[in-house]
Image: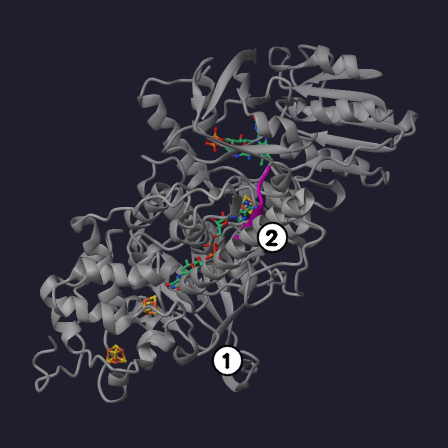
Amino acid sequence: MNKIVKKEILAQGIKLLEVEAPQISKKTQPGQFLVLRIDEKGERMPLTIFDADFTKGTVKIIFQEVGKTTVQLGQLKVGDHILNLMGPLGNPSNIKNYGHVIIIGGGVGIALAYPITKALKRAGNKITSILGARTEALLILEDKMRDLSDKLYVTTDDGSKGHHGFVTDILKELIEKEKIDLVHAVGPTVMMRAVARVTKPNRIKTIVSLNPIMLDGTGMCGGCRVTIGGKTKFCCVDGPEFDAHLVDFNQLMTRLSMYLDEEKVALQVLKKKGVNGV
Amino acid sequence: MVSNRGSRLKNSVPMPKQQIENRVQNFSEVAKGYSIEQAITEAERCLQCPKPLCVKGCPVEVDIPAFIKCIVEGEFKTAIKIVKDKNSLPAICGRVCPQEQQCQKFCVLGKKFEPIAIGRLERFVADFEPETGSKINEKPPSTGKKVAIIGSGPAGLTAAADLAKRGHEVVLFEALHKPGGVLMYGIPEFRMPKNVVRAEIDYIKKLGVTIEMDVVIGSMYTIDELFKQGFDAVFIGTGAGLPRFLGIPGENLCGIYSANEFLIRVNLMRAYEFPKYDTPVKVGKKVAVIGGGNVAMDAARSALRLGADEVYIVYRRSRNEAPARQEELENTEEEGIIFKFLTNPVRFIGNDAGWVKEMECLKMNLGKPDESGRRRPVPIKNSEFIMKVSTVIVAIGQSPNPLIPQTTKALKITKYGTIEVNEETGETSIKGVYAGGDIVSGAATVISAMGAGKKAARAIHKYLMNKERNKKLENAYARS
Ligand SMILES: Cc1cc2nc3c(=O)[nH]c(=O)nc-3n(C[C@H](O)[C@H](O)[C@H](O)COP(=O)(O)OP(=O)(O)OC[C@H]3O[C@@H](n4cnc5c(N)ncnc54)[C@H](O)[C@@H]3O)c2cc1C
Ligand SMILES: Cc1cc2nc3c(=O)[nH]c(=O)nc-3n(C[C@H](O)[C@H](O)[C@H](O)COP(=O)(O)OP(=O)(O)OC[C@H]3O[C@@H](n4cnc5c(N)ncnc54)[C@H](O)[C@@H]3O)c2cc1C
Ligand code: SF4
Ligand code: SF4
Ligand code: FES
């Protein structure tokens, strides 16, 4: 049982939980994730470890309420427990001094990009960040990311803050005027695909962190398989980070939609119980 | 004693089973088990051979005639004691051992008649036990030694039990959120009721074993760290949990599962009770399961119970070569699952939305025997045909789990990815580290995994006691 010691609402439907997990907190490296199960009837859900504090023995997770499990998780309060917490899983990010790194975070993906950015900064990289959100109210971690970045851009789909448009608009401009050694993009699959399409013709090394549907998270089921350069990989043990130019994004998007009907049913059942999320 | 010798039955007492029409609609156990009368009748068929061949066929050498004799005499408590002396998980082995290739294969009665249904009798005495009440013998004195067991499948559970019985402190680490390994996540409720597995696990807990779930060794702790934490020996029983795929075009289409994924969703996550339980599973009208082993049968029968109209088993060899247990092949056929033998898929074809809709297959012939001793399937030229499918489950085998070898550099592994051990002791290339079960043998059986756990426990005990003795000797020399 893992006790929740802190809860924060970062934006509408985006929440942070700090949970007791002493051993995971000792072992976590940037880019790794955990799998949790809220209660006996719950599903196993992967979430990136946003931050780990081994002196306190806690880890932080940030999640967006998109369906049954994330909405239910958002209902938990400080003092509540999460039944199962397993990790750290997946390969850590490859942290070294590349030179100039562009970090692109979209939506809740900014939370996933944060620990990697922190580590890349510490490794001596020059960091330019591009944060994208649907609208200003959904933009998270801007200040924290600004602290780590030599330069930071914000884009919103509706123009409510920063550049009116997509992260790729800024990326294209940067590519024209600056030398870029690495692009690291985390966010919705469509966004990562768009980034890959921009950097590929320019031959800029690009890493994306993929988020297929997972079950065990340890390589036992193959449900998380993705096609990378024509080869099948299990995202949980071979990833979650891959070379963006080799990823079959269309297949990933199709596979993410496998349980759409069931996800709707599960959410309805939860709503019938009076839980509506934020 | 042995009665009605003259009127010895030629056939064994059939296993009472749930009616076919009912059972394909529920997940309750299919084989209901013998009644007292049926068990005694079957037990009376045994010749009580002075040199029982059946025992030679049992990997853990259960004293078969002795426990059968107790059944005849109605001494069920003694019967279970005799079985448990060699086999700590009889309720499980009685259900899932491939008996026709083990104990029953060698039963002398089998030469002329049906062999004694040893597995069913073993299950009978094991199931009878909760009612007669099993007591844990007094705890042995503590040796002060600590052993870590990695993986809670039959290998790990057996090693844990045997070491605890010898007075060692045992901690069992399991990556998943429930212990039991394949018994829990793989073999379905209708063949391996989960309360049976839980009862065995409770027994092991009563012996004093601590079970820690959600611990992936390799990532949360490495084996080195376990030693640093004060463990004196380690047993690796992490199984063969990595699903194999066919490696043919279209395999990542939606609607195509590995058997592992499908069975984990159904058994461990209870997808058959969705939405009461959160995890869903997709079963279309027409399901094709690829493979011919127990795993394929389990997946096919689960799909049927989840509402598929037609379920096919597509297997590249013939029925004779199918590695599934005889009893399960029969159950599967009875339930109306359609077998397509000598057939091999070569390509999956999807619809516009990315879902599998068809499977292209080739017909096969049997050629010369291959290294497995079974006749090799050879494709027949131009025999391609298309099968319409809405769900595909790939059950062509599992590979050893690489997580621990990857994080334990000194551990020697074979080219198949299994851990290299000393056959006699289970000792690996690292001192104090032992391994057994599917991680050593490749995907095999429950009873062989248990046998390996037992062997390793014996060797670990010896190793720890020698270590203790050497320490004492050293101290004595130091003092003198
Ligand atoms: C390695 C990894 C790390 C992740 N880290 C985070 C994180 O730090 N924060 C966070 O908010 N989410 C993260 N995700 C995604 C998160 O696991 C899913 O959003 C979650 O499983 C949704 O569960 P649900 O029951 O709430 O919604 P569901 O009912 O399962 O899904 C609702 C909607 O979300 C979409 N969806 C389902 N699964 C995913 C997925 N894996 N990725 C994207 N969309 C999905 C569905 O298509 C559907 O439209 C991560 C995923 C992976 C694989
Ligand atoms: C569907 C199915 C049906 C079967 N039917 C039969 C049958 O009828 N008869 C029969 O005899 N055999 C059958 N088998 C085979 C039998 O179940 C296996 O041979 C046996 O379970 C192997 O036991 P094991 O202890 O080696 O490993 P497993 O049972 O595989 O257990 C290994 C455990 O280790 C855990 N683990 C793995 N890595 C780690 C790690 N790094 N840290 C912590 N824990 C870890 C896993 O989560 C798992 O729980 C079947 C197998 C399957 C899949
Ligand atoms: S353990 Fe298996 S092989 Fe041995 S007697 Fe029992 S059923 Fe037969
Ligand atoms: S070989 Fe058959 S008949 Fe003989 S003791 Fe064994 S079970 Fe009984
Ligand atoms: S989640 Fe099961 S193999 Fe990756």
Which residue is under mark 1? B364
Judge the density around disc 1: few (<14), some (14-19), many (≥20) Cα neighbours within 10 Å: many
Please tell me which of labels 1 and 2 falls first in the chain. Answer: 1
| Image quadrant occupied by the N terminus of chain B | bottom left
| Residue A87 shows in the view | yes
State the image coordinates of residue B9 (x, y, percent, origin top left): 13, 81
Q: Is residue B242 left or right of residue B292?
A: right
Q: Amino acid at mark 2?
A: Val
What is the quadrant of residue B340 in the picture? bottom left
Q: Amino acid at mark 1?
A: Met
Report helix, strand or loop for mark 1: strand
Which range is magenta? B230-237
Q: Chain of mark 1?
A: B
| Residue B124 shows in the view | no
Q: Is residue A273 left or right of residue B11?
A: right
Image quadrant of ligand 1 equals top right
Residue B235 is one of the magenta-drawn residues: yes
Which residue is under mark 2? B433
